Image (cartoon, helix red, strand yellow):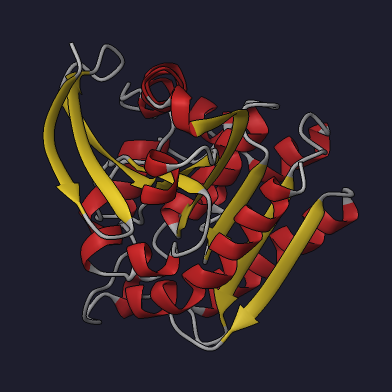
Amino acid sequence: MRTLVRKDVLPSHTIETWEWPSAALGVVKRADVLVPQTCLSAERKAAVLILLHGYGGSRSTWLTRTRLVEHLSGLDLVVVLPESGRRWFINDDRGLRYEDYLVRELVPFVDENYAVHLRHGLRAIGGFSMGGAGALMQALRHPGLFTVVASHAGAFEAPSRVGDPYAGLRDERDFMIPTEAAHERVWGPPGSAVRRLYDLPAMVDSGRASGLSVYADVGAQDYPRIVEMNRRMALKLRTAGFDLEFHERRGSHDLEYLDRALPFSLRYVDDKIRRL
């Protein structure tokens, strides 16, 4: 049973918090849904944008650590904020089925409960770091489910990571990348079936979702490994013929960078969907 547990009415948006016992995960999960007031008070329709947080974040990260609501001003987007904490939105090595929760529970719930506000079938998915890579993974694994992807500092090479390439950086404040043990709790050991299943270069090569539009950016002062993997993924997508916009912007691997970059990705998503 879906329960509306909170509703906040802002000048520009209504924010609704829903919860239900997830069949895929076996626990009660919550998600926030932001609906523009223009869709509530007029005949305007919006597209859905699902935003996936970074490692260790939550759905509230977007509302308390970025100016998401402000950045959405004038855009026809119903934004959905799920959460997975320190787990990826994949079906992971320990049996946590966050991909099934996202695709089989969250997307149908939004389609059913917000249909009156939506342009049918138009969805985008995006995120930061873990969430940015997860967004691209889900769009490639489910062709036709999402039209646009937006990634900020995507951790695209997580399935191929071995050991802890960030070991020397763990004393930094607000460090947001998992240890080797935490990483393998999700992905399994190198060579695992989960790692092979979510191998992004292989998914791009498959050509199954070549009609996807992708926005990606990364901070020029991000960790060198993150910068390089974003450059490699951009080249991979462009070579494969994807509709891609890629930028390197000023900033590091933090929520301040995410907040500054969000307006660019949100306008990209809104513009692409308006043209459909």
Quarter of the image where the C terminus is located: top right
Q: Where is residue 186 shown, x and y percent of the image?
A: 35, 38
Q: Is residue 44 above or below residue 217?
A: above
Q: Where is residue 247 shown, x and y percent of the image?
A: 67, 75
Q: Where is residue 210 shown, x and y percent of the image?
A: 82, 38
Q: Residue at x 36, y 75 (%)?
A: 254
Q: Is residue 159 visible?
A: no
Q: Residue at x 35, y 53 (%)?
A: 53
Out of 16 and 149, give the one closest to the viewer.
Answer: 16
Q: Residue at x 49, y 80 (%)?
A: 222
Out of 121 and 83, give the one closest to the viewer.
Answer: 121
Q: Quadrant of residue 66?
A: bottom left
Q: Is residue 11 left or right of residue 204?
A: left
Q: Where is residue 125 shown, x and y percent of the image?
A: 53, 44
Quarter of the image where the N terminus is located: top left
Q: Is residue 65 above or below residue 270?
A: below
Out of 122 and 23, give the one closest to the viewer.
Answer: 122
Q: Which residue is at the far front?
A: 42
Q: Is residue 8 above or below residue 98?
A: below
Q: Is residue 54 visible?
A: yes
Q: Is residue 77 left or right of residue 1?
A: right
Number of marks in picture: 0
Q: Quadrant of residue 80?
A: top left
